């Protein structure tokens, strides 16, 4: 017994010595993440989503961006780490609560129309977490005078591993509560297409990589037309992300895309500001 314990201790010490730098980096990342949450070092931005048919602002995507830190110099670095950490549910819950609270504050301050859509980014695995209950979100919505019919849960699946048969049941449960579903980054990879087929979302958000210079690239036009055809047959609305030029806007408008968002329409800002139809330069 003692010999085994000695051997285990030696192996453990060797492991610590070999992986000291990685363990130290992981510790620092974990501490920085918790510090960001504890001190609420997160800015909330609202990016308008415009109807390409009427020019009206139909809603806002709420973006929560943590302050830059040594371990997380970018927003993507922060959320990529969160997605692989044990804190994903805690962080997602905190972000969701913060987004709804700050949206409510903006509505009260600006006397904005309270019926517009609110797009909230959410990890699919969070919906599947037994701790995540629709009742908790419903209580928050009631507190902030927001209807669940306004809330669009925007799902992005960057990694494989969804159990679709189980996930469809979860999504239907949230639909029964009044929530709507959007699939983000459509056209960017296999998983987003899989999600479209299984979930039949109310909104499809076309990835910005397909939108950039679409008016000059036939291959992108063909792919977007395929998505539009699928959306039409499944009675789904399409939102083009990342519109940055007047040419992109008018081309997508002529193509029949329902809605759009991007810098040409309105940048993410800390107050609710309606989007604007871009003007040719």
Image: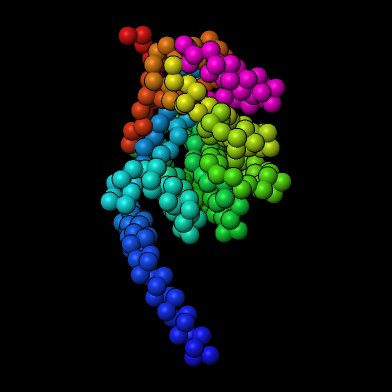
User: How many tags in the picture?
Assistant: 0
Whether residue 115 is visible, yes or no, is: no
Instruction: Tell me the residue at 60%/58% (across/down).
Output: 130
Horizontal side of 152 relative to 276 (left or right) equals right
Whether residue 165 is visible, yes or no, is: yes
Task: Please state the extent of the stretch shown in magenta in the rendering.
Answer: 214-240
Give the color scheme: rainbow, by chain, secondary structure or one colour: rainbow
User: Quick one: which residue is furthest to the bottom in this view?
Assistant: 2
Horizontal side of 115 relative to 101 (left or right) equals right
Instruction: Tell me the residue at 47%/21% (across/down).
Output: 211
x, y percent for residue 17: 35, 70
Q: Is residue 177 above or below residue 87?
A: above
Looking at the figure, which quarter contains the C terminus?
Answer: top left
Q: Is residue 83 above or below residue 17?
A: above
Instruction: Tell me the residue at 62%/33% (across/down).
Output: 193
Q: Is residue 279 above or below residue 5?
A: above
x, y percent for residue 33: 36, 56
Q: Which residue is more in the foreground, 161 or 262? A: 161
- Based on the picture, tell me whether residue 239 belongs to the magenta stretch: yes
- Mainly helix, strand or loop, the magenta region? helix
x, y percent for residue 6: 45, 85
Instruction: Tell me the residue at 37%/24% (across/down).
Output: 263
x, y percent for residue 222: 58, 16
- Based on the picture, tell me whether residue 108 belongs to the magenta stretch: no
Q: Which residue is more in the foreground, 106 or 30? A: 30
Q: Which residue is more in the foreground, 98 or 145? A: 98
């Amino acid at each position: 017994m003692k010999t085994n314990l000695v051997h285990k201790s030696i192996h453990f010490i060797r492991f610590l010595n070999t992986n000291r730098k990685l363990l130290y980096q992981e510790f620092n990342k974990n501490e920085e993440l918790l510090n960001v949450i504890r001190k609420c070092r997160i800015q909330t931005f609202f990016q308008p989503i415009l109807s390409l048919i009427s020019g009206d602002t139909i809603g806002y995507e709420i973006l929560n961006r943590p302050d830059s830190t040594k371990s997380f110099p970018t927003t993507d670095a922060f959320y990529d780490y969160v997605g692989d950490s044990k804190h994903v549910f805690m962080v997602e819950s905190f972000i969701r609560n913060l987004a709804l609270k700050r949206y409510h504050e903006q509505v009260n301050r600006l006397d904005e129309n309270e019926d517009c859509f609110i797009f909230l980014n959410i990890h699919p695995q969070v919906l599947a977490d037994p701790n995540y209950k629709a009742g908790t979100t419903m209580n928050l919505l009631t507190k902030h005078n927001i209807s669940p019919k306004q809330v669009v849960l925007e799902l992005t699946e960057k990694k494989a591993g969804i159990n679709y048969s189980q996930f469809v049941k979860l999504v239907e449960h949230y639909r029964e509560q009044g929530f709507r579903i959007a699939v983000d980054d459509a056209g960017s990879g296999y998983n987003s297409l899989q999600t479209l087929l299984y979930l039949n979302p109310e909104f499809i958000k076309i990835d910005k990589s397909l939108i950039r210079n679409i008016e000059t690239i036939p291959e992108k036009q063909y792919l977007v037309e395929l998505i539009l055809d699928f959306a039409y047959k499944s009675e789904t609305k399409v939102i083009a992300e990342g519109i940055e030029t007047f040419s992109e806007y008018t081309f997508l408008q002529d193509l029949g895309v329902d809605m759009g968002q991007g810098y040409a329409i309105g940048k993410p800002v800390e107050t609710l500001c309606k989007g604007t139809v871009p003007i040719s330069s």
